[in-house]
Amino acid sequence: MLNQVDDALAAMLPAGVLREVTPAYLEEPRGRYLGRAGLVAAPRSTDEVAAVVRACAAARVGIVPRGGGTGLVAGQVMPDGPAPLILSLERMTALRGIWPEENVLVAEAGMTLQAVRDAAETAGRLFPLSLASQGTAAIGGCLATNAGGVTALRYGTARALCLGIEAVLPDGSVVHDLKRLRKDNTGYDLRDLLIGAEGSLGIITAASLKLVVPPPNIGTAMLQVPGPEAALTLLSLAEGRMAGGVTAFELIGGQGLAFLAEVLPEIRQPLPGAEWSVLVEVGLPEGLPPEAALEGLLVDAMERGLVTDGVIAQSGAQAAGFWHLREHIPEANRRIGAVASHDISLPLSEIAGFIRDAGERLAGEGLRINCFGHLGDGNLHYNLFPAPGRSRAEYDDRRKALSELVHGMVVARGGSFSAEHGVGRLKVGDLERWGDPARLKAMRAIKAALDPLGIMNPGAVLSAAG
Amino acid sequence: MLNQVDDALAAMLPAGVLREVTPAYLEEPRGRYLGRAGLVAAPRSTDEVAAVVRACAAARVGIVPRGGGTGLVAGQVMPDGPAPLILSLERMTALRGIWPEENVLVAEAGMTLQAVRDAAETAGRLFPLSLASQGTAAIGGCLATNAGGVTALRYGTARALCLGIEAVLPDGSVVHDLKRLRKDNTGYDLRDLLIGAEGSLGIITAASLKLVVPPPNIGTAMLQVPGPEAALTLLSLAEGRMAGGVTAFELIGGQGLAFLAEVLPEIRQPLPGAEWSVLVEVGLPEGLPPEAALEGLLVDAMERGLVTDGVIAQSGAQAAGFWHLREHIPEANRRIGAVASHDISLPLSEIAGFIRDAGERLAGEGLRINCFGHLGDGNLHYNLFPAPGRSRAEYDDRRKALSELVHGMVVARGGSFSAEHGVGRLKVGDLERWGDPARLKAMRAIKAALDPLGIMNPGAVLSAAG
């Protein structure tokens, strides 16, 4: 049982770590949950993080770690239960080192993803993880939630980009495992266990990250496709022709273009009215002009009936315009106001069937469906919007049932109800409902073994004990 | 405490799973350890694996899982303690399914790596994991040991090629997590925890594996380099020019060529006498002839002084000849007879310094050093051989000290004493000595939580309790 003993706890903390409890520490981006906090601590070093954790363990006070606070599943806010200590990584923003010749960088957890990307770029390298929220999202949070984004198709999610971590465990011990090694088979993969555990097994304080040499030639195209099935065949064709050089393959549904035209009409649409289109980016070797490579793909794909129209960017500015369009789909969604949003993934060969069946099943519900996302990863954002002229509030009583319907159809096809956003507190019930029982039991055993007092992000991923 | 109660245990097992205890179940490839076994069971299904595990739990008998038996660190043989049950996956060899359009294949754990590769090839795909022992090594063992091999530079180790697993935990429960998903953030990464745990946390019974579309153009070259440092700069140059298309980058030391010339003189050497050379393979997009791409690299590298001579394969047969040479270095080593072998990895920028310092430190020891391996991964096989005319036995009393010296120098530079072979029983002491204490403590807590009876591969990775 966790207690609320703020004064006693405060006295046990390292000098100078406490911060004022301001609303910014209690918010999440969608404004759906308001967190609570007894104290906010912002340690300046790993040793101070460890000292804070030990103090909280002694006082039996829960700890909610906080990076940039951009998570979408309420992993960073604790609305219920005894008020926790918020452990903010905001002061741990050092670049500990960069080894361009190794393609490695070591960052403290509080560095923003943008800062990590900038540091890599300054050294002539690329840190490929890329998210809309990268200006605010902290790298520690990206790892804790195993963030995905648009380049996972080629470079993997955050987990695949991490070589080693430094972390404070719930007993206050510090794991020093900031290895700069590509191969290291010396025991259990504690790194990948903490990555994606959303702060419920420990606090990542620093990470050794994989960089790449940026591809010399980058090409971008928007291609109109007959449907999701053709898009997937096109992806296979492209991956074969490009030898794995497809960096991004984003599906854009016609509803998304219609929303953009409605609320952001200033954004130029290269394929207006396309029911389905894809945004393709390729990164290619020296000696292969990307326009020519994409032209070859386009001709081949049109002959096979996989593409009906297309525009290959002839300049960096034109490519940036395509990405500008893609990146503003979430903003248009926000302005329209979703009834329910779903961050799902499916086996690639189930995608077309799911889109068809879910569309049919939801047809009588008075909804508009905006289906878009990282098709190459099987990761769709399947979002439901009110029919024209109706308000979000009119659907309040059906929201939960609609999400259960969507998640049920996804799980039945071997898919996931949380592809990249994680479980947080929002989807704990989904995990209990849809998760494999033996896996859940093992997760609970691991949680109890590493965090017997239940102080690390209580109620995130797994429901709080007691 | 584990007991030896073979008759009682045998009566509890599913009908027909027992096999005769033959020497083949007790051997490991180097013949250094002889395992023991009370019983050998070869279940035909995951349910039978679970029944065997439950019976062993009830009887408190240790289980040693066995795939192809090719491991090099005695993870598959238990020479000491109460005789265990050997659980062989030899009858679980089904290809459960293949989805070429998804680039996914689901294999049972007993399929050989070669059979997995063949199944992928038949479907026009590539399963990129590649090891010398692939004709015998089982995919379950490859995952349990997180096998590496020559293509890890581009495609990662076994862990990076696995999307999901089915596994039997030490309590006999079955984790059904054979997802065919690229993104799935729904709780702790039990998959990556079991991968690399060498059977000490559970038994992987099947896996969902990532395939790739084979690159349309493959090029191969052998390049002579001034030294390891130049080789690494060459790697960066190649990775940049090829946009990540470097599939393999193998370092070959002059001693290895000399051994080949001595014991396998029929193998053709394209760069005879080269003190240092690299074998480079690239997989490139449509429209880029690989000979031209490698020619461009060669010219660029020679201008920079990174390459002094080189041969670009002009045919598949010539490329195969280069690989034939590389793959026979271990065979030549075996014929010469190593004093001590080391499967180490280092941060890339530490490699040249390590090779220099270790060479100087060992100069007076009367040894020949054959240093070769997967340079792109920082993974070297650093093997010590008797001086000409001397026998392996003359070094028996110094073997342990020499390995400690090498491992100490590796760890001091942030490297690993086991890059790809794992810990098994051979390196438990190394892990205890060199491993991070907090990480080891967490590993022991996880082992105790998932395997409280200590029946899963007792004494592998972590010393057996009690």
Image: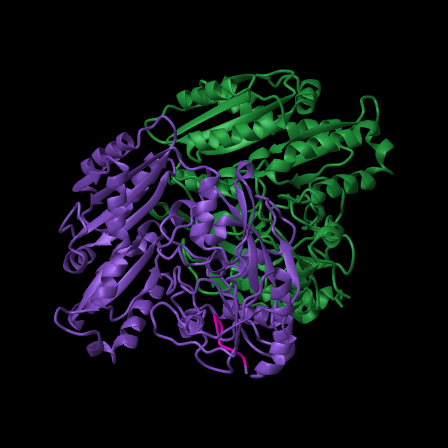
Chain colours: A green, B purple
A308 and A116: which is toward the camera: A308
The answer to whether residue A164 is left or right of residue B352 is: right
Q: Is residue B464 magenta?
A: yes
Residue B187 lies left or right of residue A401; in this view the side is left
Residue B187, horizontal then vertical, whole percent: 64, 54
**Which secondary structure dominates the residues rendered in magenta?**
loop
**Residue at screen point 64% across, 70% down:** B14
Span of residues in magenta: B460-465
Assign the N terminus of chain B to one quadrant of the image: bottom right
Residue B199 percent coordinates (x, y): 52, 66
Rendered position, A115 above or below B416: above
- Quadrant position of residue B418: bottom left
| Quarter containing the C terminus of chain B | bottom right
The residue sitting at 31% across, 56% down in the picture is B350
Examine the rendered structure and indicate whether residue A296 appears above or below residue B334. Answer: above
Q: Position of residue A407 (x, y in %)?
A: 73, 42
Residue A225's spot in the image, x, y percent? 59, 22
Residue A194 in sight: no
**Residue A58: in sight, yes or no?**
yes
| B151 sits to left or right of B158 | left
